């Protein structure tokens, strides 16, 4: 098992950024064979949640075990509190970074497959939203999307007024991250609208796996999106179980997500 922290200059973010990489390349029973192992490898770009960083998944879940069990290379970038959207004011293009630059960088540096059906994007909470939005936006790159306890807050914050505050942030933050909140619904930041447009365009939409805890404060939003996507005819799987918005749930369901990968891909 190789675990690496990587710092490199991102043109999309206009600064150095950090990511963690976990690769199942050294085994006790045999040496790593580039040809054999790459042919059987899958790749997962795994996104953290709000207030987190590139280390969260490594410390919060059994990522090394996941990598070894399913022979998957896992890359965990830092998205700050961007919701993995382009910040045009600061010229920090997090969406473009996740959907293009990070893919190009990792494929150039590491012995990983480039097949769409072996390339996945996933995340929890803010990262679940980022996985859904960017997985759909960059549908030519990703064959599957894994979204756990996704922060599907678009309909809640659309049209809020400048005096708005909730337990997480205020109007100024949401306005900065999502742009014009009065035109949010129907934009390409709206998962429902984005999925509907892709269906209309007749593109090959990634398969989607969603999960949420029954006691999670975001459970209704996840149910609503699942029902919408199912109604639109997308290939989407949704699981709901005992649990809340915590690592106990996410660790359990990142493994269940890869059970889904094994069956579907």
Image: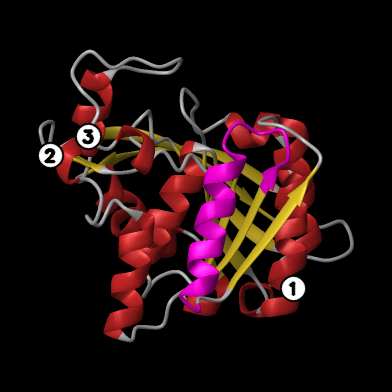
Looking at marks 2 and 3 on the same chain, the residue that comes earlier in the sequence is marked by: 2
Instruction: Tell me if 232 is positioned left or right of 178 in this view.
Output: right
Q: Residue at x 78, y 33 (%)?
A: 248
Residue underneath mark 3 = 159
Tell which of 182 and 148 is nearer to you.
182
Looking at marks 2 and 1 on the same chain, the residue that comes earlier in the sequence is marked by: 2
Instruction: Tell me if 45 is positioned left or right of 252 in this view.
Output: left
Name the spot of residue 80 as percent of width and height, x first: 38, 29
Residue underneath mark 2 = 88
Q: Badge 2, how many Cα within 10 Å: few under 14, some, many 20+?
A: few
Label 3: which secondary element: loop
- 131 in relation to 49, above or below: below
Q: Are marks 3 and 1 in contact (CB under 8 Å)?
A: no
Is residue 196 rendered magenta in the image?
A: no
Residue underneath mark 1 = 262
Judge whether residue 105 can be spotted in this image.
no
- 111 in relation to 215, above or below: below
Stretch of the chain drawn in magenta? 212-233
- 208 in relation to 221, above or below: below
Q: Badge 3, how many Cα within 10 Å: few under 14, some, many 20+?
A: some
Q: CA distance from mark 2 to mark 1?
A: 38 Å
Tell which of 68 and 83 is nearer to you.
83
């Amino acid at each position: 098992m190789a675990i690496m922290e990587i710092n490199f200059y991102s043109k999309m973010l206009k600064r150095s950024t950090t990511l963690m990489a976990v690769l199942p390349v050294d085994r006790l029973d045999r040496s790593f064979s580039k040809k054999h192992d790459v042919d059987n490898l899958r790749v997962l770009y795994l996104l953290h949640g709000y207030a987190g960083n590139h280390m969260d998944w490594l410390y919060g879940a059994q990522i090394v075990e996941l990598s070894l069990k399913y022979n998957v290379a896992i890359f965990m970038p830092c998205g700050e509190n961007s919701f993995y959207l382009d910040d045009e004011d600061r010229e920090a293009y997090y969406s473009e970074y996740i959907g293009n630059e990070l893919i190009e960088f990792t494929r150039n540096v590491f012995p990983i497959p480039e097949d769409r059906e072996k390339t996945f994007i996933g995340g929890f909470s803010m990262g679940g939203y980022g996985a859904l939005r960017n997985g759909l936006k960059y549908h030519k790159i990703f064959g599957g999307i894994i979204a756990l306890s996704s922060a599907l807050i678009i309909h809640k914050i659309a049209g809020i007024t400048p005096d708005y505050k909730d337990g997480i942030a205020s109007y100024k933050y949401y306005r900065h991250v999502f742009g014009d909140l009065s035109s949010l619904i129907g934009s390409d930041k709206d998962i429902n609208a984005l999925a509907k447009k892709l269906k209309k365009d007749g593109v090959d939409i990634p398969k989607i796996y969603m999960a949420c805890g029954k006691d999670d404060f975001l459970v209704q939003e996840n149910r609503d999106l699942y029902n919408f996507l199912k109604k639109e005819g997308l290939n989407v799987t949704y699981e709901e179980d005992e649990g809340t918005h915590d690592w106990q749930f996410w660790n359990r369901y990142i493994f269940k997500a890869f059970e889904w990968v094994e069956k579907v891909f």
